[in-house]
Image (cartoon, grey):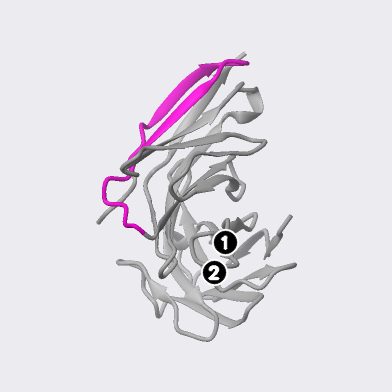
């Protein structure tokens, strides 16, 4: 089946530094990729929707200058958490889909970010 | 903001059927109904999806109301491995917009 690889699976960084998370669709071309954040024992929260070659659409309350999303190819999207602070510590997950609506979302295994 | 609504939690017994409901009263004609499940510290896993007709696959069945304002995920024989958070997610066939809520936590008793 379709595979989405997310890297790294966990990262610890110091406050004020930036962290980049990669999301790759390994065996299909993803027209759309999504980024989510999940705090402990809480539900998934959509951060942004990204279409290849165009600017990401951010959900209300998500700072686009803090969470930079790049979707430069049909198989790769990146999320950069800039100037990270302890409150950005969370589980970040991506998903990718071949087409709108009619195909499943394929999720990565998530990235656990801890900011010290 | 439109969301799908699900009960917070449900319990079932092992080897019994489980019906997980979802309300999506603001669904549009181009929205597909998807279900995913998530184990702790993992990304969600695809379960099933449909548009108008009921769907069956090896994991589950999806029953869609005639007016499409609600749906039910059916696990025919629950196992302990089915214990997870289940998300009902609408995905627009027009612009890929996602609509979902907090999910339902399914517990399975041995």
Q: Name the residue under label 1.
A: A95
Q: Residue B65 in the image: x percent, y percent?
A: 36, 37
Position of B83 compared to A5: left or right?
Answer: left
On the question of residue B51 being in view, the answer is yes
Whether residue B20 appears in magenta in the rendering, the answer is yes
Q: Which of A83 and B51 is in front in this view?
A: B51
Q: Residue A21 in the image: x percent, y percent?
A: 61, 70
Q: Which of A71 and B41 is in front in this view?
A: A71
Chain letter of disc 2? Answer: A
Above or below: residue B92 compared with residue B58: below
Query: How many discs mark residues in the rendered view?
Result: 2
Q: Nearer the viewer, residue B70 or B105?
A: B70
Above or below: residue B17 compared with residue A42: above
Above or below: residue A26 compared with residue B4: below
The quarter of the image holding the C terminus of chain B is top right
Say which mark, if any, is on residue A33.
Answer: 2
**Residue at (40% x, 80% y) in the render:** A65
Tell me the magenta residue range. Answer: B5-29
Position of A105 compared to A43: left or right?
Answer: right
On the question of residue A111 being in view, the answer is no
**Residue at (47% x, 43% y) in the render:** B53
Q: How far apart are marks 1 and 2 (CA)?
A: 6 Å
Say which mark, if any, is on residue A83.
Answer: none
Q: Residue A8 in the image: x percent, y percent?
A: 68, 64
SS at mark 2 in the image: strand
Q: Are discs 1 and 2 less than 8 Å apart at CB?
A: yes
The quarter of the image holding the N terminus of chain B is bottom left
Position of A68 compared to A73: left or right?
Answer: left
Q: Which of B63 and B24 is in front in this view?
A: B63
């Amino acid at each position: 089946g379709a595979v989405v690889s997310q890297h790294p699976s966990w990262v610890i960084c110091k406050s004020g530094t930036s962290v980049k998370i990669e999301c790759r669709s390994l065996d299909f071309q993803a027209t759309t990729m999504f980024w989510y954040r999940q705090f402990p024992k809480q539900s998934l929260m959509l951060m942004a929707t990204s279409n290849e070659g165009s600017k990401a659409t951010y959900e209300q309350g998500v700072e686009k200058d803090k969470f930079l999303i790049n979707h430069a190819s049909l198989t790769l999207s990146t999320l950069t958490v800039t100037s990270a602070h302890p409150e950005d510590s969370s589980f970040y997950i991506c998903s990718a889909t071949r087409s709108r609506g009619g195909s499943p979302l394929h999720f990565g295994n998530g990235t656990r970010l801890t900011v010290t | 903001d439109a969301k799908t609504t699900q009960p917070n939690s449900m319990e079932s017994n092992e080897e019994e059927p489980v019906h997980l409901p979802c309300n999506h009263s603001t669904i549009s004609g181009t929205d597909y109904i998807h279900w995913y499940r998530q184990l702790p510290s993992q990304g969600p896993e695809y379960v099933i999806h449909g548009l108008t007709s009921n769907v069956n696959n090896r994991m589950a069945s999806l029953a869609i109301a005639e007016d499409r304002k609600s749906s039910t995920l059916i696990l025919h024989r629950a196992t302990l491995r089915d214990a997870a958070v289940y998300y009902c997610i609408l995905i627009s066939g027009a612009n890929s917009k996602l609509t979902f809520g907090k999910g339902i936590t399914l517990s399975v008793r041995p």
